[in-house]
Image (cartoon, grey):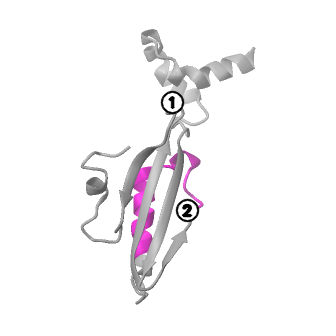
């Protein structure tokens, strides 16, 4: 019985019923994580050097919560950090990357961002995603 109640509380955010709105604050208090870690993402990133390309796997910081592993803004900041770390390499030119995301409700991935030149100082998250406030 207790396990059934537990799973019902976990499913509450996905029940589209008006009477459930009153229970939302209870759901946030009792859920394992108030932010649904439901995103799946794929990111492809290349470092561009003077005479070659290198595909790199972008790793997320170990202290980043699992719920934010697919956060497009944080992924963008990780790329900008990589640009700053690489700028002293005389062979390094830029980084290009694209990120696609899918939530539990999506059947297909959708583009979060893509850029052939992340290291360009004029590229900001806002310009990259078309002026929206994010995903």
Mark 2 residue crowding within 10 angstroms, few (<14) / some (14–19) / many (20+): few
- The answer to whether residue 69 is seen in the rendering is no
The part of the image, by quadrant, that contains residue 38 is: top right
Instruction: Give x and y (percent) for residue 47.
Output: 46, 74
Q: Which mark is residue 61?
A: 2
Q: Locate residue 74 relative to residue 133 in the image: left or right.
A: right
Q: Is residue 72 magenta?
A: yes
Q: In percent of the image, x 44 and y 85: which residue is there?
A: 51
Q: Locate residue 135 relative to residue 30 in the image: left or right.
A: left
Badge 2 or badge 1: first in the primary sequence:
2
Instruction: Give x and y (percent) for residue 84.
Output: 39, 76
Q: Which mark is residue 129?
A: none
Q: Locate residue 5 relative to residue 66 in the image: left or right.
A: right
Q: In percent of the image, x 56 and y 63: which residue is there?
A: 59
Label 2–label 1 contact, CB within 8 A: no
The quadrant the C terminus occupies is: top left
Query: What number of labels is visible?
Result: 2
Q: Residue furthest front?
A: 51
At mark 1, the secondary structure is loop
- Image position of 102 with respect to 131: above or below: above
Judge by depth and name the residue closer to the eye, 3 or 82: 82
Question: Which residues, given as a range, are shown in magenta?
Answer: 60-83
Q: Residue furthest bottom?
A: 90
Of badges 2 and 1, nearer the viewer stands: 1
Which secondary structure is most common in the magenta stretch?
helix
Q: Which residue is mark 1?
A: 105
Q: Is residue 54 magenta?
A: no
The part of the image, by quadrant, that contains residue 81 is: bottom left
């Amino acid at each position: 019985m207790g396990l059934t109640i537990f799973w019902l509380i976990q499913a509450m955010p996905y029940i589209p019923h008006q009477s459930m709105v009153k229970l939302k604050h209870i759901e946030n208090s009792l859920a394992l994580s108030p932010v649904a870690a439901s995103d799946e993402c794929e990111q492809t990133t290349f470092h561009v050097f003077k005479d070659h390309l290198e595909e790199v796997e972008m790793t997320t910081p170990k202290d980043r919560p699992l719920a934010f592993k697919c956060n497009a803004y944080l992924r963008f900041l990780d790329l900008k950090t990589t640009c700053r770390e690489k700028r002293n390499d005389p062979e390094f030119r830029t980084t290009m990357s694209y990120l696609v995301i899918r939530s539990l409700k999506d059947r297909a991935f959708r583009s979060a961002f893509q850029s052939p030149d992340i290291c360009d100082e004029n590229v900001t998250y806002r310009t990259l995603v078309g002026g929206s406030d994010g995903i």
